[in-house]
Image (cartoon, rainbow, N blue to C red):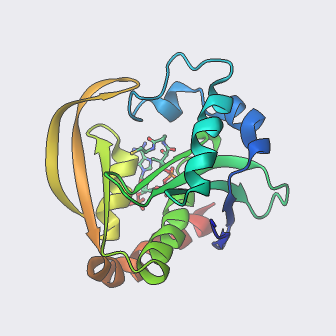
């Protein structure tokens, strides 16, 4: 079962079948999908969210993944503004997206604190392995400031927006514990700057 997680501004709740229309509305934007892996069909089909939920909900039921709908606490409307994915078997353990209206407000930093705490403290996993296209500076920054280390650069990976080299990062439990407070503070600074 995917647990509901809470941060100062967010409620991360399990995705549900009735998120379909909202995902179909928010997800098919180049700014959202450009640096996601090209397994995502593009142009996004009209039933893309339905197909994705048909595939993903059984994976969640089998305990292979957790997928959270990111919702704003203040809005009090339970409405998805992005997603956070946890793949228990990798090769990429964590991935995420937010609707562009919510970018650069420190929200994913906040969500990642909840994710990393759950991964390391509740699940007792030793390492988070995740990747990003080289030009994806926001995603890169989240990894870097959490204490992750760049362990590999794969040539010519295929993303929705093109072919770029792909960075693979690893964050150990020890490095997360050493960086957690500083990392959370950057989300709290972003809150105060709003
Ligand atoms: C990547 C993404 C999730 C970042 O979410 P976000 O909520 O905007 O990130 P935050 O506001 O928490 O910012 C995290 C850090 O990245 C920096 N950052 C965010 N977007 C950036 C950008 N486009 N360019 C450069 N830096 C950026 C922020 O300044 C912050 O750094 P700081 O704490 O040193 O100031 C968001 O841009 C997104 O949804 N992109 C589309 C989907 C995607 O690419 N997912 C990742 C696949 S690997």
Q: Report how many numbered discs are placed on residues in the image.
A: 0
How far from the left and from the top, in percent, is residue 67?
Answer: 58, 54
Relative depth, front residue between 104 and 70: 70
Classify the position of the N terminus by image quarter: bottom right
Is residue 25 depicted above or below 182 in this figure? above
Side of 86 where 56 appears, left or right: right
**Who's the residue at 61% across and 41% down the image?**
99
**Who's the residue at 57% across and 20% down the image?**
44
* Quarter of the rendering containing residue 156: top left
How far from the left and from the top, in percent, is residue 145?
Answer: 33, 66
- Residue 183 appears in the figure: yes
How far from the left and from the top, in percent, is residue 87?
Answer: 44, 56
Is residue 49 depicted above or below 129 in this figure? above
- Residue 67 appears in the figure: no
* Quarter of the rendering containing residue 74: bottom right
Residue found at the very far front of the displayed protein: 62
* Quarter of the rendering containing residue 114: bottom right
Residue found at the very far right of the displayed protein: 77
Classify the position of the C terminus by image quarter: bottom right
Side of 22 where 85 appears, left or right: left
**Who's the residue at 37% across and 58% down the image?**
89
Side of 72 where 181 appears, left or right: left
How far from the left and from the top, in percent, is residue 103?
Answer: 56, 47
Side of 65 where 158 appears, left or right: left
**Who's the residue at 36% across and 75% down the image?**
125
């Amino acid at each position: 079962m995917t647990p509901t997680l809470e941060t100062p501004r967010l409620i991360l709740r399990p995705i549900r079948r009735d998120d379909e229309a909202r995902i179909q509305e928010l997800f098919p934007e180049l700014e959202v999908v450009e640096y996601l892996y090209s397994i995502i069909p593009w142009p996004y089909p009209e039933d893309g969210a339905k197909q994705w939920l048909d595939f993903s909900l059984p994976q969640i039921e089998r305990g292979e993944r957790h997928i959270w709908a990111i919702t704003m606490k203040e809005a009090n409307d339970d409405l998805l503004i992005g997603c956070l994915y946890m793949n228990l078997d990798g090769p990429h353990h964590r991935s995420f997206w937010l609707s562009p209206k919510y970018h650069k407000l420190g929200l994913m930093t906040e969500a990642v604190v909840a994710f990393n705490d759950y991964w390391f403290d509740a699940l007792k996993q030793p390492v988070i392995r995740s990747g990003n296209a080289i030009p994806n500076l926001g995603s890169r920054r989240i990894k870097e400031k959490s204490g992750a280390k760049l362990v590999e650069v794969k040539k010519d990976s295929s993303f929705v927006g093109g072919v770029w080299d792909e960075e693979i990062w690893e964050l150990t439990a020890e490095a997360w514990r050493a960086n957690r407070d500083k990392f959370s503070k950057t989300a709290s600074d972003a809150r105060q700057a709003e």
